[in-house]
Amino acid sequence: MSEELLIFLLVPVYIAVVVFYVIALWKIYEKAERPGWNCLIPFYNIYVLLEILSKPGLWLILMFIPLVNIVVGVIITKELAKVFGKSGWFAAGLFLLPMIFYPILGFGDAEYSNPKPEHI
C-alpha cells in the first residue's frame, strides 16, 4: 500500500476520533453545568475544569512545571472521577486511556455532584 493511500485512509479516521473525543468533553462540561464550548479554548478549558473540581485556578500554573504537571494531572483525573461518582479505577482509566474513558464519562449516565469549594 502506498504512503499516500495510507494517509488518505487514516486522516479521516483520525479526524473522526478527535471529533468524537471533543464531543465527549463537551458533554462532560455540560453535565457539570458549564457551557460545552469551554472545552474548546486552550488553557481556559483547564481553568474551567479546575472550577468544576472546586480547585484554585492557580493550579493552572502548576500544569507548566515539568513532572509536577503529571502529579496534578493524576489529581485532576482522580477528582473528576470522584465528582461524577466513579471509582479510583475509573480515574486510572481517565488518566491512562482518555480516548476511551472520557467518552464513557461524557455519554454515560454519570451525574455531576458539585464538591464543596476549597479556597486558599
Image: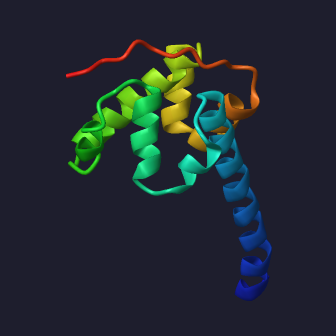
Q: Position of residue 114 (x, y in %)?
A: 51, 16
- Between 10 and 102, the one lying in front of the other is 102
Q: Quadrant of the C terminus?
A: top left
26 left or right of 75 in image: right
- Between 87 and 82, the one lying in front of the other is 82
**Taking 74 as reference, is 35 above or below it?**
below
- Look at the image and tell me whether residue 2 can be seen: no
Q: Residue at x 75, y 26 (%)?
A: 108
Q: Residue at x 24, y 38 (%)?
A: 58
- Which quadrant would residue 107 be assigned to in this image? top right
Q: Position of residue 10 (x, y in %)?
A: 74, 70
Query: Which color scheme did the rendering employ for the protein?
Result: rainbow
- Which quadrant would residue 116 be assigned to in this image? top left
- Which quadrant would residue 71 be assigned to in this image? top left
Q: Quadrant of the N terminus?
A: bottom right
Q: Residue at x 37, y 36 (%)?
A: 73
Q: Position of residue 91 (x, y in %)?
A: 51, 24
Q: Residue at x 78, y 80 (%)?
A: 8
40 left or right of 105 in image: left
- Look at the image and tell me whether residue 26 can be seen: yes
**Taking 42 as reference, is 56 above or below it?**
above
Tally the marks: 0
- Between 76 and 113, the one lying in front of the other is 113
42 left or right of 89 in image: left
